[in-house]
Amino acid sequence: MPGSRILRALVALIAVAFTAGWWLTRPLTIAPEDLPAHEPDSLAGERIFWAGGCASCHASPVDGKRAKGDDKLLLGGGLELDTPYGVFRVPNISSHPEDGIGTWALVDFVNAMQRGVSPDGLHYYPSFPYTSYARMPVADVMDLKAFLDSLPPVAGRVAPHSLGFPWSVRRGIGAWKRKYLDVAPIAPDGSSELVERGRQLVEGAGHCGECHTPRDRFGGLLRDRWLAGAQNPEGKGRVPNITPGGKNISGWSAADIAYYLESGFTPEFDTVGGSMVAVQENLSKLSGEDREAIAAYLKALPALE
Amino acid sequence: MSNMKSRSLLVAIAMAFTSPLFAGDDPVHERHELMEGVGDAAKPIGQMLKGERDFDAGVVMASFETFDDASAKFGGLFPPGSETGEGTEAAPAIWEDRDGFEQALATWADAVDAAIAAQPQTLEATKPVAGEIFKACKGCHDSYRIKDE
Protein backbone atom coordinates (compact mmCIF):
# COMPACT_ATOMS: atom_id res chain seq x y z
CA MET A 1 0.00 0.00 0.00
CA PRO A 2 1.37 3.46 -0.96
CA GLY A 3 0.06 4.98 2.30
CA SER A 4 2.10 2.73 4.54
CA ARG A 5 5.18 3.33 2.36
CA ILE A 6 4.86 7.08 2.90
CA LEU A 7 4.41 6.50 6.60
CA ARG A 8 7.49 4.27 6.71
CA ALA A 9 9.52 6.92 4.85
CA LEU A 10 8.30 9.58 7.26
CA VAL A 11 9.24 7.52 10.29
CA ALA A 12 12.66 6.84 8.77
CA LEU A 13 13.12 10.56 8.05
CA ILE A 14 12.23 11.51 11.61
CA ALA A 15 14.59 8.85 12.93
CA VAL A 16 17.43 10.21 10.77
CA ALA A 17 16.71 13.80 11.83
CA PHE A 18 16.56 12.77 15.46
CA THR A 19 19.80 10.82 15.23
CA ALA A 20 21.52 13.71 13.47
CA GLY A 21 20.22 16.13 16.10
CA TRP A 22 21.31 13.81 18.88
CA TRP A 23 24.72 13.49 17.30
CA LEU A 24 25.07 17.23 16.73
CA THR A 25 24.14 18.09 20.30
CA ARG A 26 26.28 15.40 21.95
CA PRO A 27 28.72 16.59 24.62
CA LEU A 28 32.28 16.78 23.31
CA THR A 29 34.96 16.18 25.89
CA ILE A 30 38.69 15.99 26.43
CA ALA A 31 40.09 12.50 27.18
CA PRO A 32 42.34 11.99 30.23
CA GLU A 33 45.26 11.04 27.96
CA ASP A 34 44.93 14.40 26.16
CA LEU A 35 45.83 16.37 29.28
CA PRO A 36 49.33 17.84 29.05
CA ALA A 37 52.08 16.49 31.28
CA HIS A 38 51.87 19.13 34.00
CA GLU A 39 52.19 18.94 37.76
CA PRO A 40 49.27 21.03 39.11
CA ASP A 41 50.56 23.87 41.28
CA SER A 42 48.20 25.30 43.88
CA LEU A 43 50.08 28.60 44.20
CA ALA A 44 49.88 29.20 40.46
CA GLY A 45 46.22 28.22 40.72
CA GLU A 46 45.53 30.97 43.22
CA ARG A 47 46.51 33.54 40.58
CA ILE A 48 44.00 31.99 38.19
CA PHE A 49 41.36 31.94 40.93
CA TRP A 50 41.56 35.72 41.37
CA ALA A 51 41.96 36.42 37.66
CA GLY A 52 38.82 34.39 37.00
CA GLY A 53 36.86 35.91 39.87
CA CYS A 54 35.47 32.47 40.80
CA ALA A 55 34.47 33.82 44.21
CA SER A 56 32.27 36.55 42.74
CA CYS A 57 29.69 33.93 41.79
CA HIS A 58 30.60 30.82 43.79
CA ALA A 59 31.35 32.25 47.26
CA SER A 60 28.24 31.79 49.38
CA PRO A 61 26.51 35.12 50.05
CA VAL A 62 26.76 36.30 53.66
CA ASP A 63 23.48 37.75 55.01
CA GLY A 64 22.28 38.25 51.47
CA LYS A 65 25.35 40.28 50.52
CA ARG A 66 28.38 39.27 48.52
CA ALA A 67 31.15 37.68 50.54
CA LYS A 68 34.11 39.78 51.63
CA GLY A 69 37.61 38.95 52.83
CA ASP A 70 38.24 35.31 53.72
CA ASP A 71 34.58 34.42 53.13
CA LYS A 72 35.43 34.60 49.42
CA LEU A 73 37.21 31.28 49.87
CA LEU A 74 34.04 29.48 51.02
CA LEU A 75 32.67 28.32 47.68
CA GLY A 76 29.34 26.84 48.74
CA GLY A 77 27.46 28.63 45.96
CA GLY A 78 23.82 29.63 46.36
CA LEU A 79 23.86 32.97 44.57
CA GLU A 80 20.82 33.37 42.30
CA LEU A 81 21.15 34.95 38.87
CA ASP A 82 17.81 36.32 37.73
CA THR A 83 17.89 36.42 33.92
CA PRO A 84 15.39 36.60 31.06
CA TYR A 85 15.81 32.79 30.67
CA GLY A 86 14.93 32.08 34.28
CA VAL A 87 16.78 31.80 37.57
CA PHE A 88 20.24 30.24 37.54
CA ARG A 89 21.49 29.00 40.90
CA VAL A 90 25.25 28.96 41.31
CA PRO A 91 26.47 25.52 42.43
CA ASN A 92 28.76 24.51 45.28
CA ILE A 93 32.32 24.13 43.94
CA SER A 94 33.98 23.71 47.33
CA SER A 95 36.11 20.66 48.04
CA HIS A 96 33.20 18.98 49.86
CA PRO A 97 33.08 15.33 48.66
CA GLU A 98 29.27 15.06 48.27
CA ASP A 99 27.98 18.62 47.93
CA GLY A 100 30.97 20.15 46.15
CA ILE A 101 33.49 18.93 43.59
CA GLY A 102 35.99 17.33 45.98
CA THR A 103 35.87 13.91 44.33
CA TRP A 104 36.18 15.11 40.75
CA ALA A 105 39.04 13.81 38.65
CA LEU A 106 41.29 16.42 37.07
CA VAL A 107 39.88 15.67 33.62
CA ASP A 108 36.33 16.18 34.95
CA PHE A 109 37.31 19.64 36.05
CA VAL A 110 39.00 20.46 32.73
CA ASN A 111 35.91 19.30 30.82
CA ALA A 112 33.63 21.42 33.00
CA MET A 113 35.81 24.51 32.61
CA GLN A 114 36.75 24.20 28.95
CA ARG A 115 34.01 22.15 27.30
CA GLY A 116 31.04 22.96 29.53
CA VAL A 117 30.36 19.28 30.23
CA SER A 118 29.64 17.81 33.69
CA PRO A 119 31.30 14.62 34.96
CA ASP A 120 28.10 12.69 34.12
CA GLY A 121 28.12 14.00 30.58
CA LEU A 122 25.53 16.79 30.72
CA HIS A 123 25.90 20.23 29.16
CA TYR A 124 26.33 23.19 31.45
CA TYR A 125 24.47 26.39 30.72
CA PRO A 126 26.76 29.15 29.43
CA SER A 127 25.85 31.29 32.46
CA PHE A 128 28.96 29.45 33.62
CA PRO A 129 31.35 31.19 31.19
CA TYR A 130 33.19 28.14 29.87
CA THR A 131 33.16 29.70 26.39
CA SER A 132 35.80 32.07 27.80
CA TYR A 133 37.59 29.49 29.94
CA ALA A 134 37.94 27.30 26.84
CA ARG A 135 40.66 29.72 25.72
CA MET A 136 42.75 29.28 28.88
CA PRO A 137 45.99 27.28 28.74
CA VAL A 138 45.01 23.80 30.02
CA ALA A 139 47.87 23.91 32.55
CA ASP A 140 46.25 26.97 34.17
CA VAL A 141 43.00 25.05 34.60
CA MET A 142 44.91 22.17 36.19
CA ASP A 143 46.61 24.60 38.58
CA LEU A 144 43.25 26.09 39.49
CA LYS A 145 41.92 22.66 40.45
CA ALA A 146 44.88 22.22 42.80
CA PHE A 147 44.06 25.55 44.45
CA LEU A 148 40.35 24.75 44.80
CA ASP A 149 41.31 21.41 46.38
CA SER A 150 43.22 23.35 49.04
CA LEU A 151 40.16 25.39 50.10
CA PRO A 152 37.78 24.31 52.89
CA PRO A 153 34.82 22.02 52.11
CA VAL A 154 31.41 23.70 52.46
CA ALA A 155 28.35 21.52 53.09
CA GLY A 156 25.03 22.13 51.38
CA ARG A 157 23.70 21.34 47.95
CA VAL A 158 22.23 24.16 45.87
CA ALA A 159 18.79 23.71 44.27
CA PRO A 160 18.71 23.29 40.47
CA HIS A 161 18.07 26.17 38.06
CA SER A 162 14.46 27.20 37.35
CA LEU A 163 14.29 27.89 33.63
CA GLY A 164 11.41 28.22 31.20
CA PHE A 165 10.94 26.07 28.10
CA PRO A 166 12.83 25.68 25.75
CA TRP A 167 15.81 26.80 27.85
CA SER A 168 15.08 23.99 30.28
CA VAL A 169 16.15 21.40 27.66
CA ARG A 170 19.84 20.94 28.42
CA ARG A 171 20.53 18.89 25.33
CA GLY A 172 19.81 21.94 23.19
CA ILE A 173 22.91 23.63 24.56
CA GLY A 174 24.90 21.16 22.44
CA ALA A 175 23.68 22.91 19.31
CA TRP A 176 24.43 26.30 20.82
CA LYS A 177 27.96 25.18 21.63
CA ARG A 178 28.54 24.07 18.02
CA LYS A 179 28.14 27.69 17.05
CA TYR A 180 29.57 29.56 20.01
CA LEU A 181 32.16 27.39 21.78
CA ASP A 182 35.31 28.41 19.96
CA VAL A 183 38.76 27.97 21.47
CA ALA A 184 40.52 30.21 18.93
CA PRO A 185 41.96 33.52 20.20
CA ILE A 186 39.79 36.52 19.43
CA ALA A 187 41.92 39.62 18.99
CA PRO A 188 44.74 39.68 16.40
CA ASP A 189 47.95 37.99 17.41
CA GLY A 190 49.85 39.62 20.24
CA SER A 191 52.93 41.50 19.14
CA SER A 192 54.73 41.06 22.46
CA GLU A 193 54.98 38.58 25.29
CA LEU A 194 53.22 41.06 27.57
CA VAL A 195 50.25 41.42 25.21
CA GLU A 196 50.06 37.64 24.86
CA ARG A 197 50.00 37.26 28.64
CA GLY A 198 47.26 39.88 28.79
CA ARG A 199 45.29 38.02 26.13
CA GLN A 200 45.29 34.83 28.19
CA LEU A 201 43.98 36.74 31.20
CA VAL A 202 41.39 38.86 29.36
CA GLU A 203 40.07 36.37 26.78
CA GLY A 204 40.39 33.33 29.04
CA ALA A 205 40.25 33.25 32.82
CA GLY A 206 39.21 36.90 33.24
CA HIS A 207 36.20 36.33 30.93
CA CYS A 208 35.99 40.12 30.42
CA GLY A 209 34.12 39.66 27.15
CA GLU A 210 31.12 38.12 28.89
CA CYS A 211 30.03 41.58 30.08
CA HIS A 212 31.98 43.99 27.86
CA THR A 213 30.99 42.40 24.52
CA PRO A 214 27.46 42.60 23.13
CA ARG A 215 25.52 39.42 22.32
CA ASP A 216 23.34 38.29 19.46
CA ARG A 217 19.77 37.15 20.00
CA PHE A 218 20.88 33.65 20.94
CA GLY A 219 23.18 34.97 23.63
CA GLY A 220 26.38 34.38 21.68
CA LEU A 221 29.10 37.03 21.79
CA LEU A 222 29.50 39.23 18.72
CA ARG A 223 33.17 38.65 18.04
CA ASP A 224 33.44 41.63 15.69
CA ARG A 225 32.31 43.86 18.57
CA TRP A 226 34.84 42.37 20.98
CA LEU A 227 35.00 44.43 24.23
CA ALA A 228 33.22 47.34 22.53
CA GLY A 229 30.66 47.73 25.33
CA ALA A 230 27.24 46.19 25.88
CA GLN A 231 23.96 46.39 27.69
CA ASN A 232 24.45 45.73 31.40
CA PRO A 233 23.32 42.12 31.94
CA GLU A 234 22.56 42.85 35.60
CA GLY A 235 20.32 45.86 35.29
CA LYS A 236 20.31 49.42 34.11
CA GLY A 237 22.93 51.18 32.06
CA ARG A 238 25.74 50.00 29.86
CA VAL A 239 28.97 48.15 30.40
CA PRO A 240 31.73 50.36 28.97
CA ASN A 241 33.59 50.00 25.71
CA ILE A 242 37.16 49.16 26.78
CA THR A 243 38.76 49.16 23.33
CA PRO A 244 40.97 52.14 22.44
CA GLY A 245 38.08 53.47 20.33
CA GLY A 246 35.46 53.95 23.00
CA LYS A 247 34.83 57.19 24.81
CA ASN A 248 35.15 55.49 28.17
CA ILE A 249 38.83 54.76 28.56
CA SER A 250 40.42 55.76 25.25
CA GLY A 251 42.12 58.66 27.04
CA TRP A 252 43.64 56.39 29.67
CA SER A 253 47.28 55.37 29.44
CA ALA A 254 48.27 51.73 29.98
CA ALA A 255 49.57 52.85 33.39
CA ASP A 256 46.15 54.40 34.16
CA ILE A 257 44.41 51.11 33.34
CA ALA A 258 46.81 49.10 35.47
CA TYR A 259 46.46 51.56 38.36
CA TYR A 260 42.66 51.44 38.10
CA LEU A 261 42.70 47.66 38.31
CA GLU A 262 45.02 47.85 41.32
CA SER A 263 43.42 50.68 43.28
CA GLY A 264 39.90 51.12 41.93
CA PHE A 265 40.53 54.76 41.02
CA THR A 266 40.08 56.24 37.55
CA PRO A 267 42.54 58.87 36.27
CA GLU A 268 39.97 61.49 37.36
CA PHE A 269 40.04 59.91 40.79
CA ASP A 270 36.53 58.70 40.68
CA THR A 271 36.10 55.19 42.05
CA VAL A 272 35.17 51.97 40.31
CA GLY A 273 31.42 51.30 40.34
CA GLY A 274 28.78 48.64 39.84
CA SER A 275 29.69 45.04 39.08
CA MET A 276 33.25 46.13 38.36
CA VAL A 277 33.87 46.68 42.09
CA ALA A 278 34.11 42.94 42.74
CA VAL A 279 36.17 42.39 39.58
CA GLN A 280 38.64 45.11 40.55
CA GLU A 281 38.99 43.71 44.06
CA ASN A 282 39.90 40.34 42.59
CA LEU A 283 42.33 41.78 40.06
CA SER A 284 44.04 43.80 42.81
CA LYS A 285 45.30 40.44 44.09
CA LEU A 286 47.24 39.73 40.88
CA SER A 287 50.84 40.79 40.36
CA GLY A 288 51.58 44.24 38.97
CA GLU A 289 52.95 42.55 35.87
CA ASP A 290 49.65 40.76 35.25
CA ARG A 291 47.77 44.06 35.46
CA GLU A 292 50.30 45.65 33.09
CA ALA A 293 49.72 42.73 30.72
CA ILE A 294 45.95 43.28 30.80
CA ALA A 295 46.46 46.97 30.10
CA ALA A 296 48.91 46.25 27.26
CA TYR A 297 46.43 43.83 25.69
CA LEU A 298 43.56 46.33 25.89
CA LYS A 299 45.76 49.02 24.34
CA ALA A 300 46.66 46.62 21.49
CA LEU A 301 43.01 45.94 20.59
CA PRO A 302 41.51 47.32 17.39
CA ALA A 303 39.73 50.59 18.17
CA LEU A 304 35.97 50.11 17.91
CA GLU A 305 33.52 52.94 18.39
CA MET B 1 3.74 94.19 64.75
CA SER B 2 0.41 92.86 63.58
CA ASN B 3 -0.64 89.36 64.41
CA MET B 4 -0.63 88.49 60.73
CA LYS B 5 2.94 89.62 60.23
CA SER B 6 4.37 87.80 63.23
CA ARG B 7 2.61 84.63 62.16
CA SER B 8 4.08 84.66 58.69
CA LEU B 9 7.48 85.36 60.20
CA LEU B 10 7.13 82.32 62.44
CA VAL B 11 6.08 80.21 59.47
CA ALA B 12 9.06 81.41 57.49
CA ILE B 13 11.45 80.58 60.34
CA ALA B 14 9.87 77.16 60.83
CA MET B 15 10.12 76.44 57.13
CA ALA B 16 13.73 77.46 57.03
CA PHE B 17 14.59 74.88 59.66
CA THR B 18 12.42 72.00 58.57
CA SER B 19 12.36 71.96 54.80
CA PRO B 20 15.10 70.59 52.58
CA LEU B 21 15.84 74.24 51.84
CA PHE B 22 17.72 74.32 55.11
CA ALA B 23 20.38 72.20 53.50
CA GLY B 24 20.75 74.73 50.73
CA ASP B 25 18.62 75.52 47.72
CA ASP B 26 19.51 72.37 45.87
CA PRO B 27 21.21 69.64 47.89
CA VAL B 28 21.50 67.26 44.94
CA HIS B 29 23.45 69.86 42.98
CA GLU B 30 25.46 71.00 45.99
CA ARG B 31 26.62 67.54 47.02
CA HIS B 32 27.52 66.78 43.41
CA GLU B 33 29.67 69.90 43.20
CA LEU B 34 31.25 69.11 46.55
CA MET B 35 32.21 65.60 45.39
CA GLU B 36 33.59 66.97 42.11
CA GLY B 37 35.83 69.21 44.22
CA VAL B 38 36.94 66.22 46.27
CA GLY B 39 37.80 64.32 43.08
CA ASP B 40 39.76 67.31 41.78
CA ALA B 41 41.69 67.49 45.04
CA ALA B 42 42.39 63.75 45.05
CA LYS B 43 43.76 63.77 41.52
CA PRO B 44 47.12 65.50 42.16
CA ILE B 45 47.81 63.18 45.12
CA GLY B 46 47.03 60.20 42.93
CA GLN B 47 49.33 61.48 40.21
CA MET B 48 52.14 61.83 42.76
CA LEU B 49 51.52 58.28 44.00
CA LYS B 50 51.59 57.03 40.40
CA GLY B 51 54.85 58.92 39.78
CA GLU B 52 53.29 61.17 37.14
CA ARG B 53 53.87 64.36 39.07
CA ASP B 54 56.57 65.67 41.44
CA PHE B 55 55.80 65.49 45.12
CA ASP B 56 54.60 68.78 46.60
CA ALA B 57 53.78 68.82 50.32
CA GLY B 58 51.85 72.09 49.95
CA VAL B 59 49.54 70.66 47.29
CA VAL B 60 48.99 67.53 49.39
CA MET B 61 48.04 69.54 52.47
CA ALA B 62 45.74 71.79 50.43
CA SER B 63 43.95 68.67 49.18
CA PHE B 64 43.63 67.32 52.70
CA GLU B 65 42.05 70.64 53.75
CA THR B 66 39.59 70.37 50.87
CA PHE B 67 38.65 66.86 52.06
CA ASP B 68 38.29 68.17 55.62
CA ASP B 69 35.94 70.93 54.55
CA ALA B 70 33.90 68.57 52.36
CA SER B 71 33.64 65.81 54.95
CA ALA B 72 32.22 68.32 57.44
CA LYS B 73 29.48 69.44 55.03
CA PHE B 74 28.71 66.28 53.07
CA GLY B 75 26.50 64.42 55.54
CA GLY B 76 24.07 67.38 55.73
CA LEU B 77 23.35 67.33 52.01
CA PHE B 78 21.08 64.28 52.00
CA PRO B 79 17.85 65.63 53.55
CA PRO B 80 14.60 63.70 53.13
CA GLY B 81 13.16 64.51 49.73
CA SER B 82 16.52 64.63 47.97
CA GLU B 83 16.60 60.93 47.09
CA THR B 84 16.21 61.53 43.38
CA GLY B 85 16.80 64.16 40.75
CA GLU B 86 19.46 65.61 38.48
CA GLY B 87 21.09 62.26 37.71
CA THR B 88 21.99 61.68 41.34
CA GLU B 89 24.09 58.61 42.06
CA ALA B 90 23.03 58.56 45.70
CA ALA B 91 21.88 55.05 46.63
CA PRO B 92 18.60 54.49 48.52
CA ALA B 93 20.80 52.85 51.18
CA ILE B 94 21.77 56.36 52.39
CA TRP B 95 18.22 56.85 53.67
CA GLU B 96 17.50 53.22 54.51
CA ASP B 97 20.70 52.75 56.50
CA ARG B 98 21.48 56.22 57.79
CA ASP B 99 23.67 54.92 60.62
CA GLY B 100 25.84 52.95 58.23
CA PHE B 101 26.15 55.98 55.97
CA GLU B 102 27.11 58.25 58.87
CA GLN B 103 29.62 55.64 59.98
CA ALA B 104 31.18 55.52 56.50
CA LEU B 105 31.41 59.33 56.50
CA ALA B 106 33.01 59.27 59.96
CA THR B 107 35.62 56.82 58.68
CA TRP B 108 36.42 59.30 55.92
CA ALA B 109 36.57 62.29 58.31
CA ASP B 110 38.82 60.36 60.72
CA ALA B 111 41.20 59.38 57.93
CA VAL B 112 41.38 63.03 56.82
CA ASP B 113 42.02 64.22 60.39
CA ALA B 114 44.82 61.69 60.76
CA ALA B 115 46.35 62.78 57.45
CA ILE B 116 46.28 66.46 58.43
CA ALA B 117 47.81 65.66 61.82
CA ALA B 118 50.58 63.69 60.11
CA GLN B 119 51.59 66.72 57.95
CA PRO B 120 53.48 64.44 55.51
CA GLN B 121 56.60 66.00 54.02
CA THR B 122 57.60 63.13 51.73
CA LEU B 123 55.90 60.87 49.21
CA GLU B 124 56.63 57.87 51.43
CA ALA B 125 54.89 59.54 54.37
CA THR B 126 51.93 60.54 52.19
CA LYS B 127 51.28 57.03 50.86
CA PRO B 128 49.81 55.42 54.00
CA VAL B 129 47.69 58.39 55.16
CA ALA B 130 46.35 59.12 51.67
CA GLY B 131 45.77 55.39 51.23
CA GLU B 132 43.43 55.36 54.24
CA ILE B 133 41.48 58.30 52.81
CA PHE B 134 41.12 56.64 49.41
CA LYS B 135 40.05 53.41 51.05
CA ALA B 136 37.31 55.35 52.83
CA CYS B 137 36.18 56.92 49.51
CA LYS B 138 35.90 53.51 47.95
CA GLY B 139 34.29 51.89 50.97
CA CYS B 140 31.49 54.46 51.07
CA HIS B 141 30.97 54.48 47.28
CA ASP B 142 30.68 50.69 47.19
CA SER B 143 27.69 50.75 49.53
CA TYR B 144 26.08 54.14 49.11
CA ARG B 145 26.55 55.10 45.50
CA ILE B 146 24.95 53.66 42.40
CA LYS B 147 26.97 53.76 39.25
CA ASP B 148 25.41 52.52 36.04
CA GLU B 149 28.50 52.57 33.91
Image (cartoon, coloured by chain):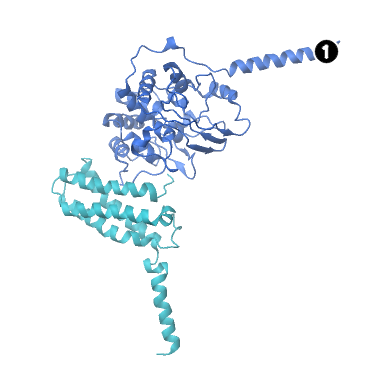
Chain colours: A blue, B cyan
Q: Residue at x 33, y 59 (%)?
A: B74
Can you give x and y, in whole percent of width and height, for residue A244 in the image? 37, 35
Q: Residue A264 at x, y = what percent?
A: 32, 41
Q: Residue at x 73, y 12 (%)?
A: A12
Mark 1 residue crowding within 10 angstroms, few (<14) / some (14–19) / many (20+): few
Instruction: Please tell me in which quadrant of the rendered image residue A40 appears.
Output: top left
Question: Can residue A192 be seen in the rendering of this structure?
Answer: no
**Along the line of sight, which residue is nearer the eye, A210 or B47?**
A210
Q: Nearer the viewer, residue A32 or A61?
A: A61
Does residue B65 lie above or below B23 as drawn?
above
Kindly indicate the quadrant of the structure image that contains residue A248: top left
Residue farthest to the bottom, as pictured: B2
User: What x and y, as percent, mark residue A35?
Assistant: 41, 13
Q: Is residue B97 left or right of residue B103?
A: right
Dot 1 falls on which chain? A
> What is the x, y in percent for residue A74?
39, 33
Residue on which the image places disc 1: A4
Q: Quadrant of the C terminus of chain A?
A: top left
